[in-house]
Amino acid sequence: IVKMAGMMTVSANIALVFAGGGMGALCRYLIQQCGSASTASYYYTAGVNIAGSVAIGMLWALFEHLELPRALYLLAITGFLGGFTTFSAFSLDVVSLMRNGQLAASVSCAVVSVIGAIGGCALGLYAMERIIRFIS
């Protein structure tokens, strides 16, 4: 990683976000391949959003507590979780369900994703803070 005056350069930051984002997007793709072409496959997107939100809450707590390097934040949170969580794909799924006349499935997917992701982030943050207090 290129360093300049003790700080990472913009191109190194971009490389970290790019690498993390690629890994996150690949993980999301592999998980979504577990689904079928039926309406149920849309819930894999919801699952990824919830899992990503739990992970981001936990990592956020760790980064604050341990004062981890910005480079690791860019790789893990901005890159990996940015590529892994799928709110753009989520939006497309919800709209596609609506356009296909599956209003109940569309609303259900939206509600589960939004409430689950926000709740997951809060849960991850709370859980990691408790773990940190326990081991400190």
Image (spheres, rainbow, N blue to C red):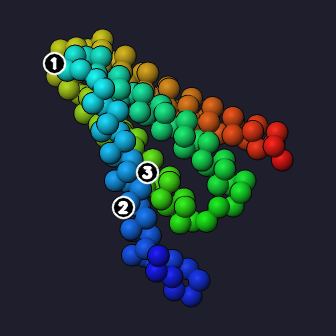
Q: Which residue is mark 3?
A: 80
Q: Residue at x 32, y 36 (%)?
A: 30
Cα–Cα gap, marks 1 and 3: 32 Å
Task: State yes or no: discs 1 and 2 in contact (Cβ < 8 Å).
Answer: no
**Kind of residue sitting beneath label 1:** Asn
Cα–Cα gap, marks 2 and 3: 9 Å
Q: On residue 100, which mark appears?
A: 1
Task: Give the image location of residue 36, x and y in percent.
Answer: 24, 20
N-terminal of the pair, mark 2 or mark 3, is: 2
Q: Nearer the viewer, mark 1 or mark 3?
A: 3
Q: Residue at x 50, y 25 (%)?
A: 115
Q: Nearer the viewer, residue 101 or 127?
A: 127
Q: Residue at x 54, y 59 (%)?
A: 73
Q: Residue at x 50, y 26 (%)?
A: 116
Task: Give the image location of residue 23, x and y in percent.
Answer: 37, 51
Residue placed farthest to the bottom in the image?
Answer: 5
Local crowd at mark 2 within 10 Å, few (<14), some, or many (≥20)?
A: some
